[in-house]
Each structure stands twice: as C-alpha cells, then as structure tokens.
Image: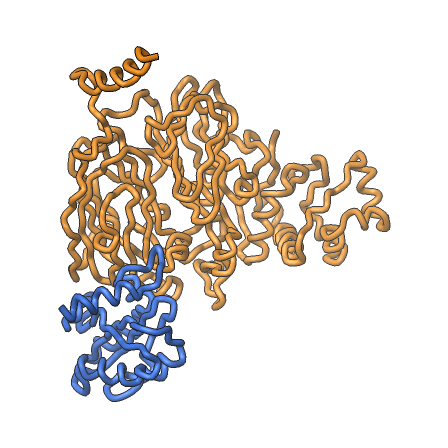
Amino acid sequence: MKTILLAAVAVPLLAACNPSAPPDAYDVSKMDLKPAPAKVSAERNKGAFAEGAALSMGAELKKLDPSPVKTVRLDTTHRVIEIAPGVKFSAWTFGNQVPGPTVRARVGDRIKFIMTNRSDEPAPVPQLVAAPMMHSMDFHAAMVSPQDKYRSIAPGQTIEFEFTANYPGIFMYHCGTPMILEHIASGMYGAVIVEPRGGYPTKADREYVVIQSEFYVKPSPGKQKVDGAPLYVLDGERLRAAQPTHTVFNGVHNGMVKQPLAAKPGERVRMFVLNVGPSKTSSFHVVGTIFDRVWIEGNPDNQMRGMQTVLLGSSNAAIVEYLIPEEGAYIMVDHHFANASQGAIGLVSTAAKPPAQDLEHHNMPASATPTEPDAVAGKLAFESKCLACHSMGQGKKLGPDLAGVTKQRDTGWLTRWLKSPEEMLKTDQHAKAMLKEYNNIPMPNQSLTDAEIKQFIKYFQWYDAQPAGSVKAQAAGH
Amino acid sequence: MRLAIAAAGFLLSLPALACGYCVEDKIAATYDHAVITRALAAGRHVVFFHVDGAAVGRSALEQAASGRGIEKGSARISPDALTLALVFDPRLVSLVELNAQLDRKLAKHKASFLPLRVMERPADLKTVKR
C-alpha cells in the first residue's frame, strides 16, 4: 500500500522534473495579460471597411499569415443586405458584410485592431438604413478589460487596441453595445480562429468557415422598397421571443446550396463551425459522412472522435474534420430541422455545380422570386415544408403538382383545405377524389395559422400569375 | 478625494447588468445622432448624465430636463441605463450651472445628476472634469 502511495506521489513529481517533457501550452506565466490601454480618437478612416492579411472574407479560409503581428481593421457600417431571395434587410455590419470577415492567427500572435464607427456614412438610399449609433467590438479571443477595450464609440470615432491570442480556438466577435441582442441580430458578428502554437495535428485538404446565425425580420412599417423589393427590418417582438424568421449559414438562407463548397473524393475537410445564435443552439451535422475528429471550441486538446453531430450553444464553436468518401453532394444542416427548414443548409460538393435533384428533402431557388412579403414568406415556407410531397411545375409526387392550383380552386377552398384537411376529407367531394387519386395518402394537418395560410396562397397566386416558363420548376429529389 | 468617492458611488449605483456597465454603453442608450448633429452645427453642446441615487421615473426626468439654456425636446432618457442626455447652449448656461439647476429639480426625489461626457465637437466624447 505504501509503495502504491509513494508511486502515486513520485510519478507526477518525476514528470514535472523531466526536462524532455513538452512545455505546458497553457503556462499562464507566458501569456500576455497586460495589454496597453485602448486609444479613441476622432480620426475617421475613409478607406476600405475591412483590411488585413489575416482576414478571409468568405467561407474559404486563407492560409495563416506568418507575421506574428496581425493588423486588422473592421469598420462598422449600416447597409442593406439580401438574406434570402427577395428579403432585403437593413443590417449593421463589421467590415461591411454579414458575417464579418474571419480573422486567422496563431497562439502568441499579437492582434492590432482598429475600428472606425462609420454608421453615419451616407448610404445610397439613406432612409433604408438605421440611424447612426454607437457600436463596439467584443473579441472572445482576447483577455482584456471590457471597460477599456470594448467601450462603445460614437459615429466618426476610431478605437485602436491590441491583444495577444493566448488560447487556441474559434472565437466569436460581436458588437457589445446595448442592446447587444439587437446588435448581434442585426449582423454584427464574426469569427477569430486561433491555431495552436505548433499548428493542427492533422493535415487538411480544404478549410472552410461556417457561421450559423438567426435573423428576425419583418417588412418595414414604412413599406420602403429596395430595387422594387420590400425592405425588411428587425422584428423586436420575434427577437425577444427567440422566434427567428431565418436561420442561416454564412449570412444567407440556403446560401451554400446555391454556391456549394468544393471538395474531392478522398479529401479531408476541416470545417470551422461557429454558432453565433444569438438565441438558438445548433446541432451541426453533415449528411453522408462522420466527423473523424471534433475539436470542441476549436482546440485540438478538446478532441472527440467519430461524431455524427456536434451541439453548439450560442457563441460555441468546433472544428470538425471529415473525409469525403465518394462523388456526391454532402449536406450540411442544423439537425434541429426547424432551423434547417429556415435556411441553415449548405453543400460540400465534389461537383462544381450540383444538380437540383442531388438535394435531399430540400429546395432550390426559383429563377424568379416574388417580392410581396406574404408571397416571399409563403415561398420560403413552401420550400421548407412542402417539397417532400409536392412540386411546382414538375408533376405529381406523393401529392399533386401545385402549379396552377389557384386556377383550379378558389381562395376559400384552399383556405379551408390548408386549415383542416381532415374535415375536408369527410365532407368535400374534390378532397375525397384527391385522396383516392393519391393512393389514400391524406394531406397532413400542418397546424398552420391563418397568417401562414394567407402566405401560402399569396405564393401560389404569385406563381400562377407568372408567364409560362419564367419560373423554374421546383421539386426536391430523393 | 471627493472625486474618488463620487466615482465609487457611481460605480456602486450602476445597475447590475452583465453588459451596459461601461460609461460608453450608458451613453449609447441615449445617443441620438440626428439631435447631436443638429445641436453641434448650431454651436450647442450635448451632455450625458448618469442619474445617481434613488430610482427616478421617466416623467420626473422629463420634467427635470427643462430650464434655462436647455433645448426644448432634446432630452433623451433611458430609465434602464439610468441615463439622461440633453442639448444645452453654453452661451446661456455653463455645464456646472446646468448640473446644479437639474440637481435642484431632482432633490425632492433624493437623486442627482452626474455628468459623464460632453460633446462639443462631432465624434468627441469629452470626459467631464469635476
């Protein structure tokens, strides 16, 4: 017993004395915990909104810039962005884009950050963007005094500060000015990737960043238009109730369906995934493969193997690495399918442009889109909920092709049908005939609200009003 | 010493918010760019006050934010952030006089105004020296 106790004490002591033991990567005595005070000035930047060799502007990540000092500029702006077809949203940004550019660094690197609040700069159509306001920057990658570095600055002011990346990981950055919820939901977020000092333990063929976030929008009360389409603004009620209208990857509803990320069979893909929220979790999953490695929070010391899904709370992140086994389009989804149905879908494809029928349970955009808000909402809902059983112009599936439905049935009938199909199947002769035609598979009651039913019908009416051939037919393949 | 006590009292009286703690966040809560731009162009100044002491409702703050040198309709109030911003004409009233004038109005509520920042030029939030 004594021997066991002695061994228990001696082994760690000997290990601590072993000169060949690897250095502690988290030795706090070697971390920078004394950054210099921030500087605020009235000097306005008039150049690019985002600058720095360490920045990647899209999903494809640039290689690590070898310089030990990364100078990064991310100015704040107010502008209109398109978050889904026909949904032009009055956003607030870092670097004039949503999400903001991704910063890439390595443990020990110094980040020299500079930001001008340019929310007061003239927009092409001023009344479409929010009034100038104070903004700030909160880097989760930094260890600094928030009162000093993360202070809000007024329009026209510039703040500069520095910090050292002490820990490896994927870290969120966001505006920290109250109400923070509104600033994040309006688009003010992005990612900082900090590699371990010695790099990652594996070699990846492709590196991508995927940032999940929610939008909460409504048509502007003033009914303003942008290029003929309605302007959407933040819906405060939905925001506070955590009921998003869109959940997206990299800022766009189904964005990486239209522009898939490339990979070849046999390649190892390293994906840096950040869930911004602000209020929902993400169950990130890639259909058709298994995560060989998952590094929770982007730190290889937090490793898991052989995972199907990684759960990320708001501002949580992970690096997922996986192999592309064969030719195909591998579907990234938030496996909370309510979120996926709001647009959190993307593809990693071995083909440059995968055909629409490669999609599983999902949709492809039409060549023309409605602009009236109810019809836009109806189209998005249709694409999310109905394409498994119906098509628009591609013929029968489990249920009828709905192209031309408003010419066959009036609004009252469609409303009753969508509201309570089971009641209609008992009483309505057309409903009964349809059930028979479609192998007695009943239309399920989707528990739609009156507003949602109106949106569906508006979309069907819009579709049926288009000239023949002007709208691309829609159907999900299997 | 008085300044240190005032600062400590100010920090202790701030609402226990995880964020919105910083002085600049309080200013952000009442920052109205249109009002500020107009005021500075007319040679007026904008001051941001922390409301110190007992809880004071919006209506009491609105009533307090009027008087000599104060631009009518310029007050911006955030009861949550305990902040009041207003435009004043420095040719008619100094900041010290303005502060005293406002404090007299809030005395019955057992509260007072602590000036945080003043804007005399665009993009320049100047710390108020006391």
Placement of the C terminus of chain B among the 4 image quadrants: bottom left
**Which residue ends up furthest to the front in the rendered image?**
A2
Q: Please tell me in which quadrant of the rendered image residue B47 appears.
A: bottom left
Query: In the rendering, what colour is chain B?
Result: blue
Report x, y in % for residue A160.
18, 52
Q: Which scheme is used to colour this image of the protein?
A: by chain
Residue A263 can be seen in this image: no
Q: How many marks?
A: 0
Report x, y in % for residue A343.
51, 43
Residue at the spot 69% in from the left edge and 50% down from the top edge: A447
Closer to the camera in the image, B123 or A394 = B123
Query: In the rendering, what colour is chain A?
Result: orange
Q: Is residue A28 above or below residue A139?
A: above
Placement of the N terminus of chain B among the 4 image quadrants: bottom left
- Horizontal placement of B80 versus A22: left or right? right
Q: Please tell me in which quadrant of the rendered image residue A202 appears.
A: top left
Residue at the spot 33% in from the left edge and 60% down from the top edge: B20
Residue at the spot 24% in from the left edge and 43% down from the top edge: A143
Residue A436 can be seen in this image: yes
Q: Is residue A438 above or below residue A369?
A: above
Closer to the camera in the image, A180 or A401 = A180
Closer to the camera in the image, A413 or A237 = A237
Residue at the spot 18% in from the left edge and 16% down from the top edge: A18
Q: Is residue A104 above or below residue A148?
A: above
Report x, y in % for residue A263.
40, 25
Report x, y in % for residue A325.
47, 18
